[in-house]
Amino acid sequence: MAEKIIIIKNIGSIINIEKDNRRLMSKVSGEASGNPDTLDNAFLVVENNIIAGFGEMAEMGSVISQYETCDIEYTDAGGGLLLPSFCDSHTHLVFPYSREREFEYRLNGLTYEEISAKGGGILNSAKAMDSISDEEILEASFKRINGIIATGTGTVEIKSGYGLTLEKELRLLRIIRKLAELSPVTVRSTFLGAHAIPAEYKSDPERYISIVTEEMMPLVAEEGLAQYADVFCEKGFFSREQSERIFDAAIRFGLRPRIHANQLSDCGAIDCAVSKGCISADHLEVLDAERIAQLASSDVIATLLPGCAFFMDSDFPKAKDLISAGATVAIASDYNPGTSPSGDMLFMMALGCIKMKMTPLQALMASTINGAAALELSHRKGSIAIGKDADFFITKKIPSLAYIPYSYTENPIERVFLKGKEIRTNNI
């Protein structure tokens, strides 16, 4: 029996709950993503940092009687909603400096490609790595982690990709590992050496690909620095054929593929994602009916990044069409200094509703259980179920889930629990 039990009482509604725990939810596809189970006027029990039970308030007395010898800590939700923490499955959260100067360039009419040609974009951040210490990057990144905790995120994927040399890529991945050790969030790490081709290899990209696959990957695998490998498959970056070769190497080293796909054009990235068994294809701003059907008939999770489309003033991914076709859709923040400088998943959920016409329930499922699936953590994260990690947040007393995207500049979160421990967001 646990020494200490946490009981959350007077919950207005628990949303995205698994009442049947014979088989934990893995992901939700198509129209089913708009129909999660809910439980009104509820309580929830946390034992040993795991969700141990839940039910209607009328049943609470009989349930807690089994814990009469334990130290019980009660938390009154005051009629607020209880939601599983967000699982943000695509970020570049560890970076050296902000890039607001490039924001000004765009406002003055330069395109993403023109900014990159001037030495901006990804290569700018890679160059900036030379002028900042590991301690400074870690401190800045930890502040960003605290920021996303305050807006509901409990699990986050973080990519490298702002190094583009063996030494700097390893530096970034080691910093990500340190963040995982220090922070209460659950961190998944992705090796993104194939984020861009450094200037010195523009005339010989094959040489850089060899460095990624033959020099970087073996050491990443040897140190256990990443679970995944990613490639920016796009014109001017890495072709479909180059991406496939990189993924072949990644698979040999035990790194599961995921891919930046169809952000600026359709150059075969989705073909690559399907053929190489990528767990997710991310971005998907450029998507026609054929590609939608291809994703829907595959196991590839369509991860949409509305923060990037918003900041870059580009077309938003076709979430409704993907859902109607039966695809598995996730929402992630793409938190990065150049094209999506925010990790606020409350806002991403709002953009999912306002700009991609998802229902609030669809946006919630895309931001929780399907994000967890994209990180292969849905057995532990992404929904409220007995046996899953006690990662959740409690809102103020609000009228409904729809109030969250409706009041999109307001943070309704009152209390945050990660792995069963309350995180005091007013102190971070």
Image (cartoon, grey):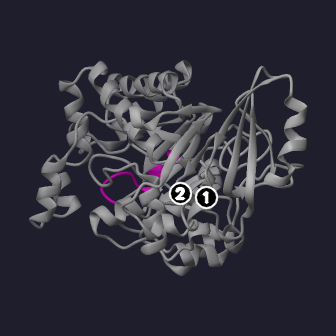
- Residue 281, numbered label: 2
Q: Secondary structure at mark 1?
A: strand
Find the residue positioned furthest to the left.
Answer: 108
Magenta stretch contains residue 237 = yes
Q: From the top left corner, tell me how far across and down residue 88 is, in percent.
A: 51, 48
Q: Amino acid at mark 2?
A: Ala
Q: Quadrant of the C terminus?
A: top left
Numbered label attached to residue 301: 1
Q: Residue at x 38, y 68 (%)?
A: 265
Q: Position of residue 271 (x, y in %)?
A: 56, 63
Q: Is residue 327 visible?
A: yes
Q: Is residue 295 magenta?
A: no
Asked if the residues shown at circle 2 and circle 1 are in contact, with their CB atoms under 8 angstroms apart, the answer is yes
Mark 1 crowdedness (10 Å alpha carbons): few <14, some 14-19, many ≥20: many
- Identify the residue at image location x=90%, y=43%: 62
For residue 2, what is the image quadrant? Answer: top right
Identify the residue at image location x=39%, y=41%. 147
Q: At x 20% / y 41%, what residue is drawn? A: 124
How many residues crowd mark 2 within 10 Å: few (<14), some (14–19), many (20+)? many
Q: Viewer-proximal residue, 314 or 74?
A: 74
Which of the pair 44/170 is nearer the observer? 44
**Which range is magenta?**
235-245
Q: In the shown orientation, is residue 105 left or right of residue 154?
A: left
Give amino acid for label 1: Ile
- The answer for how far apart the CA atoms under marks 2 and 1 are is 6 Å
Left or right position of 365 against 261: right
Q: Position of residue 413 (x, y in %)?
A: 49, 50
| The N terminus: image quadrant | top right
Q: Residue 389 vs residue 111: left or right? A: right
Q: Is 79 above or below relative to 70?
A: below
Residue 428 visible in the snapshot: no
Label 2: state its secondary structure.
strand
